Amino acid sequence: MKNLRIYSSDKKIPKEKLHHFVKFILEDFNLTLSSLELNFLDSEKIRKINKEYLSHDYSTDIITFNYSGDKNIIDGEIFISLQDAKQNAKKYKVKYIEEIGRLIEHGILHLIGFDDSTPEMRKKMKNQENRLLKKYKFILLR
């Protein structure tokens, strides 16, 4: 997929599958891709980003930066902590690649205007994540 770049030091990240996965999600919402970077980092690097840009001094599973003023055009960066994703997968008893998929979905949902700052908004976002993962996880698992 043109204009989608995936950076990871972990060779187990299936870049080709993730390209297809993102393509289906964008098509699901009828979105245009201007530019999207998926960056898979260790927890220390994501902690530094979290502290520098968001003033939070802790690791987190995902950070999303949106550079588009249009909810129908994707232009942004998603940073995912590999360690946090692995911990989430164990905690929620799902496959690691499914958790990676959920985090990518979460980031894309933020890019199109979803928010998780209140319980009601979080529930709406989680419903979308569940719908997308159910519909497209076959791409990740094949």
Image: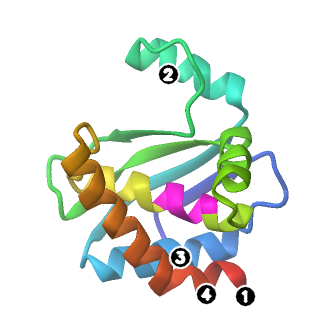
Spatial CA span between label 1 and label 2: 33 Å
* Relative side of 133 to 75, left or right: right
Spatial CA span between label 4 and label 2: 32 Å
User: Going from the N terminus, do you reach mark 1 or mark 2 first?
Assistant: 2
Q: Position of residue 27 (x, y in %)?
A: 33, 82
Residue at 72% across, 67% down: 95
Color scheme of the displayed model: rainbow
Q: Quadrant of the C terminus?
A: bottom right
Residue identifier under label 4? 138
Spatial CA span between label 4 and label 1: 6 Å
* Relative side of 131 to 31, left or right: right
Residue at 67% across, 40% down: 84
- The label on residue 50 is 2
Q: Residue furthest left?
A: 70
Spatial CA span between label 1 and label 3: 11 Å
Residue identifier under label 1? 142
What's the amino acid at mark 1? Arg
